[in-house]
Image (cartoon, helix red, strand yellow):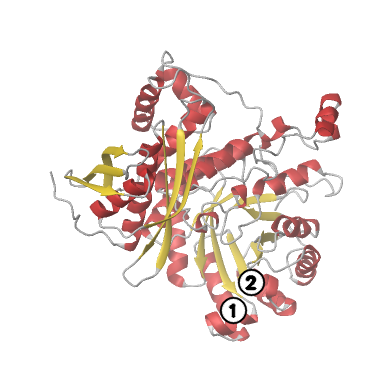
Amino acid sequence: MNDPNRVLIFDTTLRDGEQSPGATLNLAEKLEIARQLARLGVDIIEAGFAIASPGDFEAVSRIAQEVGQLDQPPVIASLARCAKKDIEQAWSAVQWAKRPRIHTFLATSDIHLKYKLKISRNDCIEQVGEFVSYAKSFCDDVEFSPEDAGRSDPEFLWQVLSVAVQAGATTLNIPDTVGYCTPQEYGQLIEGIINNVPGIKAGKVIVSVHCHNDLGMATANTLAGIKAGARQAEVTINGIGERAGNTSLEEVVMALKTRPQFFGGLYTNIDTTQLVRTSKMVSSLTSIPVQPNKAIVGANAFAHEAGIHQDGMLKNPLTYEIMRPEDVGWNSTNLVLGKHSGRHAFADRLRQMGYDLNRDELDKAFERFKALCDKKKVVSDADIEALLTDQFESLGNDLFKLDELHVATGTGNTPVASVRLIDQDGERHEDAALGNGPVNAVCNCINRITGANAKLVEFHVHAVTEGIDAIAHVTIRVEMSDSEGKKYVFSGRSADTDTLVASGKAYLAAVNRGLQRTQLARRPVAESV
């Protein structure tokens, strides 16, 4: 089925990664990430959980229709519980891909069986056989995951997996769902599965690893599983995901590439020069910043401050670097554009940066680029990235759009903001509000107009480039409750040369998402004008 030395990369950024609090992506953003994952060379893209929502279904379907139809496309997968409706919905979404996959799962740990599913071990075995077989009736490529495998009884796990193989599963994924295992334990678990589940040694079934980072061992566990014989790794860009996150794609890929002797010549088909570009795109579109000391793609990953390190680097980079920065994409050309740059040059640069925009999207982006050129002498890649992030943010079905914003503030004065919004019907609504600071005043005003009861829980602002004319990139998270009192976190982001304008747009983006999700939209308190 596969070169025994090749490790398949299963990227779940768009499914497990999107489960990070506040990391909700709209359709346009998911498509851009999926296209970039294909350029990166991932083997399987888990495009979403098709039954989770109409939006998830549409995203999986569109990715299957577009990315799944490339000349050499990745496999497009959708997650599905062991339930007929889930499996049917997953197939309806992925069927358009040249290489579709249904990924179904059922918990196998005693704690999940008893308290979550309330079924016996025999019930579990019967359901696995029934629903893997049902998935197989739609799709030849079926993956089965025993949820919480890391805390499951190994011998029972062998039974369940054997039934899954008999029912037609072609990939067996072993999740350490709560990040409980140590590398030695996890490696032994994988080794035991390979030795005791029929079909694996014969090459008919691939064993996959899926680890969470609750104890900071996700990458170590994944590599231990690969060392023990697994040949698929389930990962996310930047390691994003629920709680402490998932195994980081870039860390696994570069560990295998940097230490080939230790891993016996194992390799992936990832184009590592695309790692930094992909990392920046995902970070920007999900509003989840990459920590500076993050391995491989962090801003400080190849930075050296200590004098003895700098001295060694000047004499021979190998003294303190085990990888070349250009191997992971840090040496990409930073072409500077300006107001005299044409549409063709701008479009070409977007393609080099990994963005594939249609005609209308390109027209809007170029118009905003020209407007920025009037404010800045030169526009860098980072500025363009910020503009596109802001543009993708506004592609959702927003309930309100910012029309005007004015803020009066200063030493000894109470800040006051006046805001005008336009709703979906084209009506304008405006109001004014005080605050303990200019950003707080803007947020209070937006709350008054939209009727949202949003609470600002996180606010980040940073300059995209150097200089006093730099674009301000603002990321905001708000907490909102639905009608039953359940709390959710929503993110918004925007970029502008005016920090207050960027803040207002980012806050409104988060509120729009919250209103759509929690169905809290009420008639604005301000009069229409």
Residue 253: give x, y in percent of width and height: 71, 45
**On the rendered structure, is 100 left or right of 214?**
left
Question: Farthest residue toward the front?
Answer: 412
Tell me the quadrant of the picture where the C terminus can be found: top left
* Marks 1 and 2, the one that precedes in the sequence: 1
Q: Name the residue under label 2.
A: 148
Q: Residue at x 49, y 48 (%)?
A: 286
The quadrant where residue 494 appears: top left
* Whether residue 473 is situated above or below residue 251 in the rendered picture: above
Query: How many residues crowd mark 1 within 10 Å: few (<14), some (14–19), many (20+)?
Result: some
Q: Is residue 72 visible?
A: no
Query: How many residues crowd mark 2 within 10 Å: few (<14), some (14–19), many (20+)?
Result: many
**On the rendered structure, is 295 left or right of 503?**
right
Q: Name the residue under label 1.
A: 112
**On the rendered structure, is 82 left or right of 174?**
left
Q: Are marks 1 and 2 in contact (CB under 8 Å)?
A: yes
Nearest the camera: 73 or 456?
456
Q: Could you give the CA–CA distance between mark 1 and mark 2, rounded to whole angstroms?
A: 8 Å
The quadrant where residue 363 appears: top left
Residue 39: give x, y in percent of width and height: 57, 37
